[in-house]
Image (cartoon, rainbow, N blue to C red):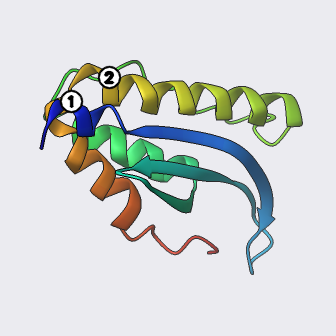
Amino acid sequence: MSAQSYNQIKVLIPRHQQVESKSGHQFVLYSLEVYYLGKCHRIQRRYRDFHSFHKRFKKLITTPEFPPKKVRNNLSQKFVEQRRETLEKYLQESFEMKLSHSKQFIYYLISCPSRKIYR
């Protein structure tokens, strides 16, 4: 893959939504837009999916600091928006830090089956 192709990678988290599982547990889904080679892949991920991504790739490369988990008030609008921004920054920095693994990052983000999102 050429260096020019890597320049076409862009990851955004433009929005989020609070969801309630069948058991009544509330959580946040983050909507990702992964732009790669002229295509936009839209997917939704929970915080724990990002954490799984981080754990997997920190074994391969030095990763940026991952946004910490917060137990209290983690559904407040202010907190969720700050987390969205820090997750987006984390992903963008991950792609910039180690371009040789970008293809693996994209594949993992786009195709990894998220654990049942709505449990």
Classify 10 Å Cα crowding around label 1: few (below 14), some (14-19), many (20 and above): some
Residue at 18% x, 30% y is 3
**Whole-percent x, y for residue 75 in the image:** 81, 43
**Tag 2 secondary structure:** helix
Return the residue nearer the eye: 72 or 51. Answer: 51
* Location of mark 2 (residue): 96
Please tell me whether residue 52 is drawn above or below residue 113 in the rendered image. Answer: above
User: At 75% across and 38% down in the image, what residue appears?
Assistant: 74
User: Dot 1 corresponds to which residue?
Assistant: 99
Residue 107 x %, y %: 28, 57
Name the spot of residue 90 as percent of width and height, x first. Answer: 46, 27
Please state the horizontal and vertical placement of residue 104, each as a whole percent of the image. 21, 49
Compared to 115, does 22 lie above or below? below
Query: Any mark on residue 42, and which?
Result: none
Judge from the rendering whether residue 7 lies leftward or rightward of residue 78; answer left or right: left
Q: Locate residue 19 relative to residue 7 in the image: left or right.
A: right
- Residue at x 87% of width, y 36% of height: 77
Q: Are marks 2 and 1 in contact (CB under 8 Å)?
A: yes
Quarter of the image with the N terminus in it: top left
Instruction: Residue type at mark 2: give it.
Output: Glu
Left or right for 27, reference 64: right
